[in-house]
Image: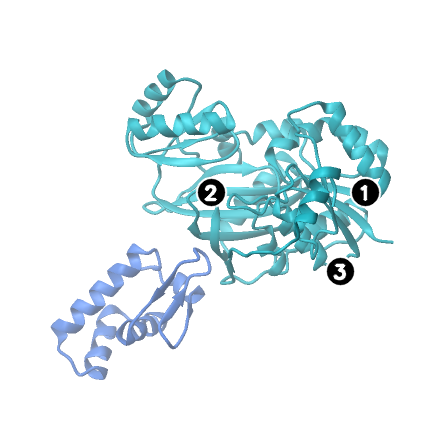
Amino acid sequence: MDRDKLSVLAISDSGFIFDPVTGHSYTANATGLRIFELLKEDKSEDDIKSVLMEEFETTEDEVSVDVDDFIENLKKYFLI
Amino acid sequence: MKIVVAVSGINAVDNPGPGTGICKALKESDLDVRTIGLAYDAMEPGVYMDNIIDKSYIMPYPSGSREAFIERIKHIHSVEKIDIIISALDAELPIYMDIEPVLTEMGIKMLIPTKEMFKTRDKLRLKELAETIGVKAPEYRSCTSIRDLHDSTEEVGFPCMVKGPFYEAFKANNIGEAEGYFHKIAMAWGYPIIVQKFITGDEYDVVGCGDGKGNDIGVFAIRKMTLTKLGKVWNAVSVKNDRLIEATKKVVSGLSWRGGFEFEVLVESKTQDIYVLEINPRFPAWVYFAAGCGINLPERMVKLLLNKEYETHSNYDSGKLMIRFTNEMIKDIKDFEQISTTGET
């Protein structure tokens, strides 16, 4: 997974994400925003899932679906 | 003493010319400029925009007599002492390229492409150009008859883009639509009509200006966010895309481009490949967007022509939005009478 692009994205606390290279903008919810932060910290997918399970007090299955979907979307939009 | 700059394309209508944006950029620059509008019709909105255009004159159509065109400029020059003309319409560029030596003798300066440069960026030579600058060109065919159109659409497939030689482009989903657009465009702009493969992706534009020696004097890139039915950009956001800027600089250096230009490309969604769609040989209608973000290309062009010092950087912020809007002015019928009867404001 190429995470270099994440460093150029402008991400606001409200979850608004702007890609200055493509001019596209996106909105992420609180979970998405947290996944972004953890990806930028270079955490592995497993680490991200563990952190989210703890912070959002949820099951591994639910977290896995969220993280996998979110990362798939990031790839689709060429953000990673 | 004021610098007198005459600007064409002051038709700020639903298919807007760049003239009013150029004048606005000049008025906001640090130059002391008197702007002269060169209109082709008494109803061109720029004629009435006296906040940015100091005086307007009606010009004879560029497709008419060369002598009449020169005579009109001579008359305007005798009154206004024009320093520079900024031509902003594709259809009039050939006559300006032709008469530039005459204008130079009169003391009027222009920064426009040569005939060879103008031909190189022709829509029918896109593939050649794309290879030179290291990007792709969508597959296309040139048509001058309905038979050509049928053959071309069979080869290119549907959906496809049906485009005019100067302006207008429509997406056709079947041969019925393609024929309709073919006739519509031919009636308005003549031949050839271009049938181009449709590629799914995002449209980007770069405005820039070349000094004629292979250097650019600034470039500014945008992603088109919303378009009008005529395919004109309505809202846009500034972007910093290195691949796009690099391709643009190759256009300028490869052609030793002289003058303003608009580099239109499409980035394919699936592959992120850059496809060149068009190179317009003049500033685009949204040129003021660049000026508003610190890349005032009309100002730099004027300074270059007058041998004044000018900036060449392309340092601007991404994430700036251009919001175009409609507006109304209330003028007196006497203003219309003045321009209609005397040919000037």
The quadrant holding residue B51 is bottom right
Is residue B134 in sight in this rendering?
Answer: no
Colour applied to chain B: cyan
- The amino acid type found where label 1 is placed reads Ile
The percent coordinates of residue A80 (x first, y second) are 34, 60
Disc 1 from disc 3: Cα separation = 19 Å
Q: Is residue B314 above or below residue A38?
A: above
Q: What's the residue at 81%, 47% (across, down)?
A: B307
The percent coordinates of residue B254 (x first, y second) are 60, 36
- Residue topped by disc 3: B30
- Residue topped by disc 1: B82
Disc 2 from disc 3: Cα separation = 32 Å
Query: Which of the marked residues, 2 or 3, is nearer the chain's N terminus?
Result: 3
Q: Is residue B305 above or below residue A36?
A: above
Q: What's the residue at 29%, 34% (across, down)?
A: B173
On-image quarter of the N terminus of chain B? bottom right
- Residue topped by disc 2: B265
**Between marks 2 and 3 in the image, the one whose residue lies nearer the viewer:** 3
